[in-house]
Amino acid sequence: MPALPWVDRTHRASRLVQRGLAAVLALCLLLAQPPALAQGVELLTLQATRNEGAVQLEFAARVQLPRAVDDALQKGVPLYFVAEATLMRSRWYWRDVRVARIERSWRLAFQPLTGSWRVSLGGLNQSYASLEEALSAVSRSGGWRLIEADRLDKGESYYLEFSYRLDSSQLPGPMQFGLGGGSDWTVGVSRTLRIDP
């Protein structure tokens, strides 16, 4: 007995509804996932402000260490985090020119005798009771002097190339040899920010 036309249309419509519901469900699950970190680092703030006759940089990031990096840190291997900022002036007729470049490096190490975390910046050292506090200290900076404001020409276009990363080149030699291109040790984030002169 041949199928009735209205039964065939109803069957087709129910399949379309099922597919539509499945697509909506998949989209909801995708949107419900927490935002992915850019290689273990989420950049919370990045801004350049004029203060005291200079352009100053401020940034804050949230760092989530991969398991391999965290294990090495817990075993006493010091980690180095580097923030770099390069101020560029746009040129339409040639490559953009670098106007200023600054870099800051933090050393993070576990102190097993005291059970504390030590952060070093230049010649300054600070101890923290937890890894979270220490990571917060190595992933933010304020009032970082980039360039004197009078060195920026009015009418020119400037932008800032910023990067913050775990510097695996400062790990002990044997560890560097075994890293290869291991994605566990690639922790960092980069951004470009327009600067108004």
Image (tube, grey):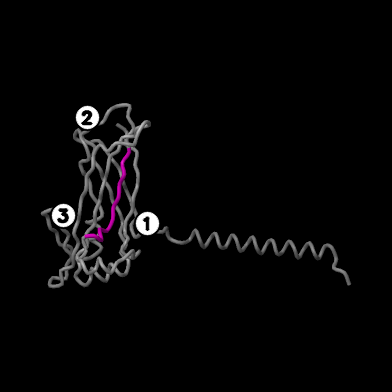
Whether the magenta-drawn stretch holds residue 44 is answered as no
Q: Amino acid at mark 2?
A: Asp
> Three-letter amino acid code at disc 1?
Ala
- Disc on res. 150: 2
In the current view of this chain or complex, which residue is farthest to the left?
123
As measured in the structure, the alpha-carbon distance from the residue carrying label 1 to the one carrying label 3 is 24 Å
**Residue drawn at (28%, 67%) of the image:** 69
Residue 90 in the image, given as x and y percentages of width and height: 34, 34
Query: Dominant secondary structure of the magenta stretch?
Result: strand
Q: Which residue is mark 1?
A: 38
- Give the residues in magenta: 159-169
User: How many labels, in total?
Assistant: 3
Mark 1 touches mark 3? (CB < 8 Å): no
Q: CA distance from mark 2 to mark 1?
A: 35 Å
Q: Dot 1: what SS?
A: loop
Q: Which residue is mark 3?
A: 121
Image position of 168 with respect to 142: above or below: below
Rendering quarter of residue 51:
top left
Towards the viewer: 192 or 111: 192
